[in-house]
Image (tube, rainbow, N blue to C red):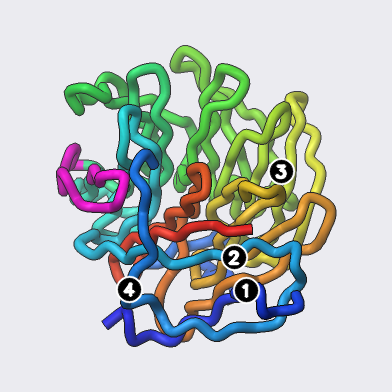
């Protein structure tokens, strides 16, 4: 059972003083709140470590079972969240993927709100629609009915990953081409293409007038300006996946083989959580106020955390 796993996490309390990228031809491969939430009573076996006082604490709330290779999470307007289920491999056009709806506290409300997808990953809800990356297209669904309205083909894409909205445009990453695409009115252009700095590009997230970008093979957290200029914020996070903004400042970054890092705005990355030995993957981390939600491709769970300063 998950509750019996031995997870290592930096825990800050008042008494304290304070995987390599898998490759195939050089390309990264992924593995096969409105409501007040209370901490789980059967919380995982944490191992306290002495850590600097500036680090945030991540406190387990709940582990939700019942998903199949969950990869992405997006806030659902009106409450709750969307969870993407690849239900196969990350590149197979097999039509077995789906999107679930969960309540604000994680209960599965609709297991298959939309199904028949290939490998749905990153998602963002915007202006009445849910945008979902699916290998080489961005699918657009009506938030009220779940009906697909459009499928935007991204020429040359082979591993579309994360998605976000920034500066009135949709941005999606393609992990295999080192590209962040910009989409406006269904027209796709390259925002940034850099085979070195964006090698294995994954998470994208707005941060004021900048766009945060995480990369797997490069292991970087970078920041892009509106003209595409890239600035590296932190390194050392190989297989970096999702990005969240910590409530007290700085950033949280997942690494899909099983790590979660904290990156202060002016400092180096610090590992907060390591579940690799337990076989628990940490995929597209997302932060909503003080709640952090992380899909775990394996073992098919979604974990809810509370972030404390």
**Residue 18 picture location, percent across and down:** 75, 74
CA–CA distance between discs 1 and 2? 8 Å
- Whether label 1 touches label 2, CB < 8 Å: yes
Helix, strand or loop for disc 3: loop
- Residue under label 3, please give it: 194
CA–CA distance between discs 2 and 4? 17 Å
Residue 41: assigned label = 4
Q: Which residue is drawn at 72% across and 32% down?
A: 210
Mark nearer the viewer, 1 or 3: 1
Q: Which residue is drawn at 28% across and 52% down?
A: 106
**Residue 169 picture location, percent across and down:** 55, 20
Q: Does the magenta stretch include residue 107?
A: yes
First-in-chain label (3 vs 4): 4
- Residue under label 2, please give it: 57
**Residue 198 picture location, percent across and down:** 68, 48
Q: Indicate the quadrant containing the C terminus: top left, top right, bottom left or bottom right.
A: bottom right
Residue 13: assigned label = 1
CA–CA distance between discs 1 and 4? 18 Å
């Amino acid at each position: 059972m998950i509750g019996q796993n031995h997870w290592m996490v930096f825990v800050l309390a008042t008494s304290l003083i304070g995987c390599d990228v898998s490759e195939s031809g050089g390309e990264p491969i992924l593995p096969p709140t409105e409501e007040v939430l209370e901490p789980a009573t059967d919380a995982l076996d944490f191992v306290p470590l002495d850590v600097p006082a500036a680090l945030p604490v991540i406190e387990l709330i709940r582990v939700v079972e019942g998903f199949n290779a969950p990869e992405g999470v997006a806030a659902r307007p009106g409450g709750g969240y969307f969870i993407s289920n690849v239900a196969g491999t990350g590149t197979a056009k097999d039509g077995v993927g789906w999107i679930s709806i969960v309540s604000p506290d994680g209960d599965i409300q609709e297991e298959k709100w939309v199904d028949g997808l290939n490998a749905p990953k990153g998602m963002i809800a915007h202006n009445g629609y849910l945008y979902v990356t699916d290998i080489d297209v961005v699918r657009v669904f009506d938030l009220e009915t779940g009906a697909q309205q459009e499928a935007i083909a991204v020429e040359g894409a082979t591993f579309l990953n994360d998605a976000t909205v920034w500066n009135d445009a949709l941005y999606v990453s393609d992990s295999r081409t080192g590209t962040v695409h910009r989409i406006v009115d269904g027209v796709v252009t390259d925002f940034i293409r850099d085979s070195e700095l964006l090698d294995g590009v994954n998470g994208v997230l707005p941060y004021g007038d900048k766009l945060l970008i995480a990369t797997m093979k490069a292991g970087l957290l970078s920041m892009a300006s509106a003209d595409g200029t890239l600035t590296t914020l932190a390194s050392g996070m190989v297989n970096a996946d999702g990005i969240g903004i910590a409530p007290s400042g700085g950033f949280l970054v997942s690494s899909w083989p099983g790590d979660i890092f904290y990156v202060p705005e002016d400092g180096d990355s610090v590992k907060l959580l390591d579940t690799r030995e337990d076989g628990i993957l940490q995929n597209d981390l997302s932060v909503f106020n003080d709640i952090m939600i992380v899909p775990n491709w394996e073992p098919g769970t979604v974990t809810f955390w509370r972030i404390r300063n």
